[in-house]
Image (cartoon, grey):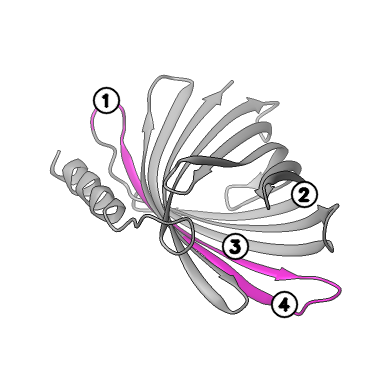
Amino acid sequence: MKKLNFCLIGLILALTTCAHAWDDHDFQVWNTDTQDFKLNKKLKATLEEEFRWADNASIFYYHHYDIGVSYVVNKYLAVGGGYRHIYELRKGKFKLENDPYMTATLSVEKRGFSLDSRNRLEYRHFDYQDDLWRYRNKFTLKFPWKITKLEIQPYVSNEIFVVFGDNIKSDFNQNRFSAGLGMKLTKNIKAEIYYMLQSSKSSDIWKDTNILGTKIKLAF
């Protein structure tokens, strides 16, 4: 229980840094719902839907649908691909973005610690601006503790974003650091709650966003 209390206190302290503006230090709420379908021992399909609220969680501004597949090559490597359909509020209107992507995830476990490195390459197609490519790399470290019957497990992650295209040079323009708790609600339902500090660059100016996120995953 001491470990659980420590993790919860850390999340609460992180959230108290939130300011009250949609620009720098905005507070947002994100919710993600996923469904995993195991097709065989090595292949699974995933459906995902995500919603985001900004301006101190008062404005709904983002929604995506995602469908993907993942194949486990061995205990160290999984590869996959998919498609993401995004609606984002821009200048008062929801505009469409289409993102096909490929992934490769390296994994290792030692003494109960689990470390994943997910590499993701996206092609971002827009109707209102030039198309872009984006590379994402996400490290996730899960700690060996599983607390209470819910198997509450703390984790931390960090993800970097690098964008490039025909008319722009390669540019590191976003970083997401997260700390959260994963838990097992039932045999087929898992949940997460996390705090994320997102740092984004626009016109060489970096701005931070404080995010409270929740995830629900159904596995079949």
At horizontal 65% and vertical 26% (from top left) the residue drawn is 38
Q: Nearer the viewer, residue 80 or 99?
A: 99
The nearer-to-camera label among 2 and 3 is 2
Marker disc for residue 137: 3
Q: Earlier in the sequence, mark 4 or mark 3?
A: 3
The Cα–Cα distance between marks 2 and 4, rounded to whole angstroms, is 18 Å
The nearer-to-camera label among 2 and 1 is 2
The Cα–Cα distance between marks 1 and 3, rounded to whole angstroms, is 32 Å
Marker disc for residue 170: 4
User: What kind of residue is marked 1?
Assistant: Lys
Q: Give how far across and how far down residue 145 sits, in percent.
A: 28, 43
Q: Earlier in the sequence, mark 1 or mark 3?
A: 3
At horizontal 76% and vertical 80% (from top left) the residue drawn is 169
Left or right, 39 with reference to 183: right
User: What kind of residue is marked 3?
Assistant: Asn
Q: Nearer the viewer, residue 87 or 189?
A: 87
Please say whether residue 163 is one of the residues in the magenta stretch: yes
The Cα–Cα distance between marks 2 and 3, rounded to whole angstroms, is 16 Å
Magenta span covers which residues? 148-176
* Residue receiving disc 2: 99
* Residue receiving disc 1: 149
Q: Earlier in the sequence, mark 4 or mark 1?
A: 1
- Quadrant in the picture for the N terminus: top left
Q: Earlier in the sequence, mark 2 or mark 3?
A: 2
Q: Residues within 10 Å of mark 2 (few under 14, many from 20)?
A: some
User: What kind of residue is marked 2?
Assistant: Asp
- Snapshot quadrant of residue 26: bottom left
Q: Give how far across and how far down residue 94 sits, in percent.
A: 71, 43
User: What kind of residue is marked 4?
Assistant: Ser
The nearer-to-camera label among 4 and 3 is 4
